[in-house]
């Protein structure tokens, strides 16, 4: 599935979404943004998809904006311009989205990865929020996602300098959870996604993800209220019974809950 710039392959509950311009190190274009957004929307509505892995074809994840237009790459924006060109955002997808950063992730390539729930990265990959070195500034809500992940001081170090750092440093900073050899990144991400698809209840994961991304705007009492409200949705439902029985009977669970059945907020 997908178009020439973004492909989607679904197998056994896992969708692998691939940025597919390897000859350009998967440099970002408007077509790629539209394709990625469509892939997210399709996977969100497809109840057979339980988790997504986003990766890049070839040796890079995404080398940033396509600079082929030269000096006009960042020309004056027209009507309707948005600094967040992929909709829905990864955090709005009701299934976990894992970024398998198999190689270099620069500029919007990295800011889009920051919208994902889990990030695995090639240890020797070159990463940079290089926008300020190109005369623009970080996009895709990076001024929210990055400080949220690693704190203001570390975010300022990366966003305001635009410096290059490695996948290994990304893990040390808290931007990614694991640094691996480039060849191991996608298999490891797929393993996590498959584990989610097999062993976690769809509605439980969707509601937990919703709370994780909303928590920065909530105080502890509001989180408690929502946790209680969401427990009223899942407790007593078939999957709450199935999860316990599967564990007791030492078998894989057979989930029946659908994320489409959940209230929107």
Image (cartoon, grey):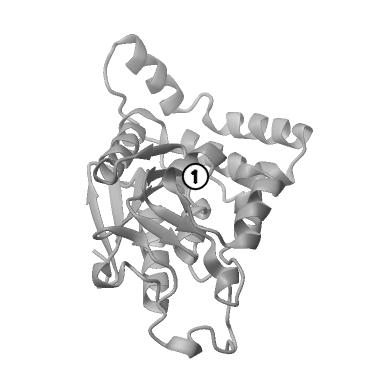
Q: Where is residue 115 in the image (x, y as percent from the top left)?
A: 52, 54
Location of residue 95 (image quadrant): top left
Report the number of discs.
Answer: 1
Residue 233 vertical placement versus 105 (above, below): above
Residue 96, visible in the rendered structure: no
- Residue 66 falls in image quadrant: bottom left
Expressed as whole percent of the image width and height from the top left, the position of residue 106 reads 45, 62
Q: In this rendering, would 34 be left or right of 158?
A: left
Residue at 55% x, 88% y is 75
* Residue found at x 47% / y 45%: 261
Residue 219's x, y, as percent?
77, 38
Residue lying at the far top of the rendered structure: 248
Closer to us: 15 or 64 = 64
Q: What element carries label 1?
A: helix
Is residue 241 in sight in this rendering? yes
Left of 42 or right of it: where is 263?
Answer: right
Which quadrant is the N terminus positioned in?
Answer: bottom left
Q: Viewer-proximal residue, 178 or 192?
A: 178
Q: How crowded is mark 1: few (under 14 residues within 10 Å), some or many (20 or more)?
A: many
Which residue: 42% across, 20% down?
Answer: 241
Is residue 59 placed above or below 99 in the rendered structure? below
**Residue at 24% over, 60% down:** 58
Viewer-nearest residue: 164 or 208 = 164
Q: Mark 1 points at which residue?
A: 170
Q: In this rendered view, identify the residue nearer to me: 195 or 161.
A: 161
From the top left corner, tell me how far across and down residue 200 is, in percent: 39, 30
């Amino acid at each position: 599935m997908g178009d020439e710039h973004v492909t989607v392959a679904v197998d056994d509950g896992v969708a692998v979404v691939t940025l597919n311009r390897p000859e350009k190190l998967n440099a970002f274009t408007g077509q790629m943004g539209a394709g990625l957004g469509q892939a997210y929307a399709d996977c969100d509505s497809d109840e057979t998809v339980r988790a997504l892995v986003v990766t890049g074809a070839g040796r890079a994840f995404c080398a940033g904006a396509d600079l082929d237009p030269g000096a006009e790459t960042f020309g004056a924006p027209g009507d309707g311009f948005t600094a967040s060109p992929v909709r829905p955002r990864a955090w709005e997808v009701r299934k976990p989205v894992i970024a398998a950063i198999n190689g270099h992730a620069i500029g919007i390539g990295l800011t889009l990865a920051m919208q994902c729930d889990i990030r695995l990265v090639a240890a020797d990959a070159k990463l940079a929020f290089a926008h300020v070195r190109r005369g623009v500034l970080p996009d895709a809500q990076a001024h929210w996602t990055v400080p949220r992940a690693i704190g203001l001081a570390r975010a300022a170090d990366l966003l305001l300098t635009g410096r290059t750092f490695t996948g290994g440093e990304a893990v040390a900073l808290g931007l990614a959870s694991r640094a691996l050899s480039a060849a191991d990144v996608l298999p490891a991400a797929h393993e996590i996604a498959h584990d989610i698809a097999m062993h976690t209840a769809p509605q439980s994961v969707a509601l937990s993800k919703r709370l994780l991304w909303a928590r920065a705007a909530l105080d502890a009492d509001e989180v408690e209220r929502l946790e209680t409200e969401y427990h009223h949705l899942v407790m007593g439902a078939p999957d709450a019974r199935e999860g316990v029985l599967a564990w007791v009977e030492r078998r894989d669970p057979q989930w029946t809950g659908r994320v489409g059945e959940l209230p929107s907020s």
